[in-house]
């Protein structure tokens, strides 16, 4: 992509995105990087066009299963569609009905908790560790998208 810098590349359109591209964008996006925010706005606007979304309220009509598996996977880096929309359009009052998580899933117990400050993150890690045997080493097996889908935007 650097070989032709004059083209506005959309890496999410490749069958396979460049290695760690979504992780990198998510990390920068969570820290408020304006370039990452612009990238994600382009991404979400393209999905909006594909699903006939003309105004923010139209997103309520886009059901998760209508998104391609690739798009759903990509959005998990940002906590899923509702979380991404909340981050991109914070002044809008979103009222998504979050789907029920399967019983015993890690994220169902932590969706309500704030991760904004160090104390909240520490408390969340303690609660999460208790669900994986009480050992912090058990947290190594928790996938990042599960943590982000539980409401954490940075860790």
Image (cartoon, rainbow, N blue to C red):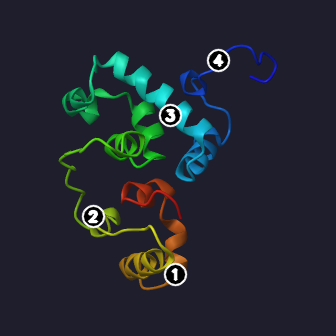
- Label 3 vs 2, first from the N-terminus: 3
- Label 1 vs 3, first from the N-terminus: 3
In front: 85, or 75? 85
- Quarter of the figure that contains the N terminus: top right
Q: Estimate the spatial distance between the alpha carbons at disc 4 and disc 1, rounded to whole Å.
A: 43 Å
Numbered disc total: 4
Q: Secondary structure at mark 3?
A: helix
Q: Estimate the spatial distance between the alpha carbons at disc 1 and disc 3, rounded to whole Å.
A: 33 Å
- Circle 3 is placed at which residue position? 40
Rendered residue at 28%/66% (across/down): 112
As drawn, the label of residue 5 is none
In front: 96, or 14? 96
Dot 4, how many residues are within 10 Å of its Cα: few (below 14), some (14-19), or many (20+)?
Answer: few
- Circle 2 is placed at which residue position? 108
Q: Secondary structure at mark 1?
A: helix
- Circle 1 is placed at which residue position? 136
- Label 4 vs 1, first from the N-terminus: 4
Q: Is residue 126 above or below residue 85?
A: below
Say which quarter of the image contains residue 12: top right
For this view, does 39 lie left or right of residue 51?
right
Q: Secondary structure at mark 4?
A: loop
- Label 2 vs 4, first from the N-terminus: 4
Rendered residue at 43%/68% (across/down): 115
Q: Estimate the spatial distance between the alpha carbons at disc 2 and disc 1, rounded to whole Å.
A: 19 Å
Dot 3, how many residues are within 10 Å of its Cα: few (below 14), some (14-19), or many (20+)?
Answer: many
Rendered residue at 30%/63% (across/down): 111
For this view, does 20 lie left or right of residue 121?
right
- Circle 4 is placed at which residue position? 8
Q: Estimate the spatial distance between the alpha carbons at disc 3 and disc 2, rounded to whole Å.
A: 26 Å
């Amino acid at each position: 992509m650097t070989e032709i810098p004059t083209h506005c590349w959309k890496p999410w359109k490749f069958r396979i995105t460049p290695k760690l591209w979504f992780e990198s964008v998510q990390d920068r996006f969570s820290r408020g990087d304006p370039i990452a925010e612009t990238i994600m706005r382009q991404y979400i606007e393209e999905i909006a066009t594909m699903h006939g979304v003309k105004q923010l309220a139209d997103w309520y009509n886009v059901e998760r299963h209508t998104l391609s598996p690739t798009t759903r996977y990509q959005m998990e880096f940002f906590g899923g569609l509702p979380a991404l929309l909340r981050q991109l359009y914070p002044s809008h009052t979103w009222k998504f009905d979050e789907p029920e998580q399967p019983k015993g899933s890690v994220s169902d117990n932590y969706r309500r908790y704030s991760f904004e400050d160090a104390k909240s993150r520490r408390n969340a890690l303690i609660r999460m560790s208790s669900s994986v045997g009480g050992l912090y080493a058990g947290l190594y097996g928790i996938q990042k998208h599960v943590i982000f889908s539980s409401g954490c935007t940075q860790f």
